[in-house]
Image (spheres, rainbow, N blue to C red):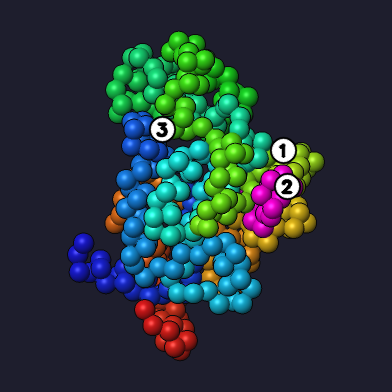
């Protein structure tokens, strides 16, 4: 890292030191999984490196309860970080939890209650599995051929197919995956007893019960079936928001937080869903998307998070936590100077 880059990073870290970063993980793959790289499935060693970095640095890792209390007081601790996991993968328990406990870092797992204990996968994981298990040279989709002979081919094809799937309905995606299973002679019965399935399956309630015994784990709602609410009738959206909270309260004892599935405002949910979630009694509501931090005056019912993806090496991780990916996106010199002055007159230090 150049001296100039280091200075810029330190400056942005100073400006954002009284803001909180909420980081979103999904899956932490064990070393023996041996899957090709995909965005939302981070390697165990990299996750360990990131948590070790947090444990041995200036950052204060908060529970959701501590974050809520800080927002109620309009006073965030310096360099606050919150760790969250979406979807409720088994590897959050088997692989991530021991690392979190090793470094005493709290985390919240947002679970989709209708998927708990089900022998099923989300379509991205199903597509990964079909590609991983295939010995074919290529797949055909909409008249196009996609190479899948090597691990690199499979990685590239996964990315290309997810782009193709972006314009499809859930039923069309399911049909495409079924077609891929036929093309690759995918043996579903054998797959559901494989190590590949074990690496990406969802938690069971027994595993959730075991996780909740850990002092570093909290749980929140991620809906019932992990569907984009904006495409559902109002009654179904309300059911996704309310029923998941009710189930978690029954099984775990309390549920104060909700994270929108997919999490993009205007794409996956809108203000109407905000009202539904507020009426359901959630005290914290999270979105997801591009890098944004939580400020002391942020609305607890509209809190941004930042996705941590599988290519987020420790230098990018450090940069993300110290003010964002791009120094040029700060806004303006006036904003920068305003931030510095506020920091100076608040009496706080680095």
In the displayed structure image, the side of residue 288 where residue 195 appears, left or right: left
Dividing the picture into quadrants, the one containing residue 3 is: bottom left
- Secondary structure type for disc 1: loop
Q: How far is mark 1 from mark 2, CA to CA? A: 25 Å
On the question of residue 226 being in view, the answer is: no
On the question of residue 219 being in view, the answer is: yes
Dividing the picture into quadrants, the one containing residue 122 is: top right
Specify few, some or many for label 2: CA neighbours under 10 Å numbering under 14, 14-19, or 20 or more: few
239 shown above or below 350: above
134 shown above or below 238: above
Quarter containing the C terminus: bottom left
Mark 2 / mark 3, whichever is N-terminal:
3
83 shown above or below 345: above
In the rendered structure, which segment of residues is drawn in magenta?
246-264
The residue labelled by disc 2 is 250
Specify few, some or many for label 3: CA neighbours under 10 Å numbering under 14, 14-19, or 20 or more: few
The residue labelled by disc 3 is 159
The residue labelled by disc 1 is 232
* Residue lying at 49% horizontally and 51% vertically, measured from the top left: 24
Mark 1 / mark 2, whichever is N-terminal:
1
Q: How far is mark 2 from mark 3, CA to CA? A: 39 Å
- Secondary structure type for disc 3: helix
């Amino acid at each position: 890292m150049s001296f100039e880059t280091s200075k810029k990073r330190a400056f942005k870290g100073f400006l954002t030191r009284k803001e909180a970063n909420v980081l979103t993980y999904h899956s932490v793959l064990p070393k023996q999984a041996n899957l090709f790289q995909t965005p939302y499935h981070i390697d165990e060693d990299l996750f360990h490196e990131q948590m070790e970095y947090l444990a041995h640095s200036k950052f204060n890792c908060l529970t959701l309860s501590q974050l809520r209390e800080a927002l109620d007081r309009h006073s965030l601790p310096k360099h606050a970080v919150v760790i969250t996991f979406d979807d409720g993968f088994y590897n959050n328990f088997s692989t991530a939890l021991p690392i979190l406990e090793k470094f005493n870092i709290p985390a919240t797992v947002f679970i989709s209650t209708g998927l708990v204990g089900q022998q099923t996968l989300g379509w991205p994981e199903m597509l990964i599995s079909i590609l991983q298990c295939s010995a074919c040279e290529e797949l055909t989709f909409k008249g196009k051929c996609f190479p899948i002979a090597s691990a690199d081919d499979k990685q590239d094809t996964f990315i290309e197919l997810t782009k193709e799937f972006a314009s499809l309905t859930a039923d069309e995606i399911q049909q495409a995956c079924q077609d891929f299973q036929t093309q690759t002679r995918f043996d579903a019965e054998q797959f559901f007893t494989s190590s590949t399935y074990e690496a990406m399956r969802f938690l069971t309630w027994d595993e959730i019960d075991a996780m909740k015994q850990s002092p570093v784990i909290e749980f929140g709602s991620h809906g019932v079936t992990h569907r984009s609410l904006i495409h559902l009738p109002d009654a179904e959206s309300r059911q996704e928001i309310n029923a998941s909270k009710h189930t978690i309260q029954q099984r775990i004892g309390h549920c104060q937080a909700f994270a929108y599935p997919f999490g993009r405002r205007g794409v996956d949910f809108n203000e109407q869903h905000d009202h539904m979630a507020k009426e359901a009694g959630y005290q914290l509501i999270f979105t997801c998307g591009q890098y944004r931090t939580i400020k002391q005056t942020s609305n607890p019912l509209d809190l941004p998070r930042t996705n941590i993806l599988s290519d987020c090496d420790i230098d990018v991780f450090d940069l993300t936590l110290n003010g964002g990916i791009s120094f040029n996106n700060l806004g303006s010199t006036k904003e920068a100077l305003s931030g510095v002055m506020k920091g100076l007159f608040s009496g706080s230090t680095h």
